[in-house]
Amino acid sequence: MDINNIGNQLNLKKVNTVKLLIAHKENLNILEDYLTDKYKVLTTPKNFENDDIIIVDEQGFAEHKEKIIKIKQSNNSLYLPLILITRVSTDKIPEKYIKIIDEIIKTPIQQKILNSRIKNLLNVRELFLSTQIYQELTEKNPVGIAILFENKKIKYINQAFLDILGEQKENVLEKEITFFIENKNFLNQLSKHKIKDKKRLNINLNINDQSKWLDIRCSNIIYQNINLKLLIMVDVTEQKQSEKEIKYLRFHDQLTGLYNRDYFMEELKRLDTQRQLPLTIIMGDINSLKLVNDVFGHDQGDILIQNTAKILENNLRNEDILARIGGDEFAILLPNTEKKIGKEIANRINQNCSDFIGEGIISISLGVATKNSVNQDIDDVFKSADDNMYQNKTTESKRVKKEIISNINRKLRKESDESKAHIKMVKKLVLKFAESLNLDDEHKEKLKLLAESHDIGKISVKEEISKNKSQLTAQERDKLKGHSEYGYRISHSIPDLTNIAEEILSHHERWDGKGYPQGLKHEEIPLLARIFTIVDHYDLLVNGRGSKNEKNKKETLKSNKREIWRNVRSLFSR
């Protein structure tokens, strides 16, 4: 940038303003006559900061000297020329005023001399303006700027460049740039005699034990026949980090940290070459993830996915590709691996799942297929592995569901206030009741299941369940009441319980409509839910808490006889 022409480039040219502080009326008229054609002439002693040049006589200077001196000495002001019109000799003007006066013109005033002096001073002012703008552009520029002499020695450097290097100016000037930037590509570029402005380098440097990515542009400049090099440097570390994060997110699964489906499909194409044969694919699907999500919540489901991913990872080589391609689905690419080895890996994964020590059950159905010939379509191999996986899942999933349900029941008995004896008694009583009502075997089986699983939803609210209900807060009691709805949702994930889902939902409804969760009343309540509720309530009154001996049992039964029979009679309104 040519600072001598910066005013023109920035379109800063304007009509200059001349401030006249002339007390002598005749001289004031002369000056106005001389200057009006070329300049904007002002005579009011205000707004000095907007003037380009000030012309005063002795009296005018005396009246405004404090303001003029203040402006001239201000660091914030641009260069403001001051011309004194006087009839006295220079040696009679005090030294302190001489320092701030730029030109002295003696009367009588000659127009030619006056115009020449004003023009020169305005040129100097314009140069000051251009220089200041140039310094602002470089010093406060967020881009690092440095000028090198003799190719390497630093002659100028701005603050942004210093910040990138982590150095002070006094430690950098006159030193070679190679002392701070040691990079082969950068040095090669620097040594070239012809450097185009568009040429840029992207390099990684370790500066003060900190890794930084720098975007550098190099160009040649000539100043008064001296060859210089201009370096423009930008710290793009954050940008690189963002690009890295975006790339990671694009190709990785956030829950497990594994590759995702997009990456897997790209790798499948890339590895589909003669050199990678035999190429084995293993497809995997976690068994009963939906059941775990429904029963224990999605947090537990996420833990199951993460633990499964770790087992898969631990059984693979560095060159193998493992990806989570769906909610419960995984895919593995094994380059240069025969099908026999692929099956061994699958068996090892299944064994590790069985040996897993921790909360919950880990089980994954796996299918293996191998491409042995270039004539095979990789998509067909992929589909074959998927089909094999689903064949295994059909039988494996049933086993895992039964095991999970067994765990659920164990947990329920452990964490619920209902004892095994109570459940056993309710099953016995409910079957007797069903016989007295002449119910068929299908209804009897449903009642048995209901006795065993009516409170299955409590698994999902186990943290709110206490053996002493009086200690529960109102919010905890409301949460506990939600177990009927949780049980309804869970039962739809367990085939054996699907046909009693409505009864599980309704087993806390009341004949008078004051039950929960739906506030059903009378015949709106499913029949089997009414039967179960009567028997469950009866057993708790007779054999439950507070009925430890025969006398207490009889008294409890007698005091609740009316309520029990009212519920029993309700059955026959069907």
Image (cartoon, helix red, strand yellow):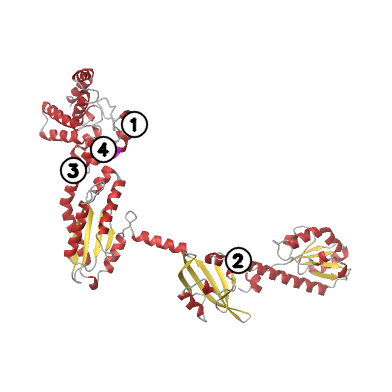
User: Which disc is residue 139 wearing?
Assistant: 2
**Can you tell which quarter of the image residue 523 is in?**
top left
Rendered residue at 70%/62% (across/down): 75
Amino acid type of disc 4? Gly
Q: CA distance from mark 3 to mark 4?
A: 16 Å
Q: Nearer the viewer, residue 65 or 299?
A: 299
Q: CA distance from mark 1 to mark 2?
A: 68 Å
Q: Which residues are magenta?
A: 458-462
> Which badge, 2 or 4, comes first in the chain's sequence?
2
| Residue 491 on the magenta span | no
| Residue 461 on the magenta span | yes
User: Which disc is residue 451 wearing?
Assistant: none
Dot 4 corresponds to which residue?
A: 457
Is residue 470 placed above or below 370 in the rendered structure? above
**Can you tell which quarter of the image residue 365 is in?**
bottom left
- Is the C terminus in the top left, top right, bottom left or bottom right quadrant? top left
Q: Position of residue 391 (x, y in %)?
A: 16, 55
Dot 3 corresponds to which residue?
A: 495
Dot 1 corresponds to which residue?
A: 472
| Circle 1 or circle 3, nearest the eye | 1
Asked whether the beta carbons under mark 2 and mark 3 sit within 8 Å of each other, the answer is no
Q: Residues within 10 Å of mark 4 (few under 14, many from 20)?
A: many
For the question of whether residue 12 can be seen, the reply is no
Horizontally, residue 251 falls left or right of residue 46, namely left
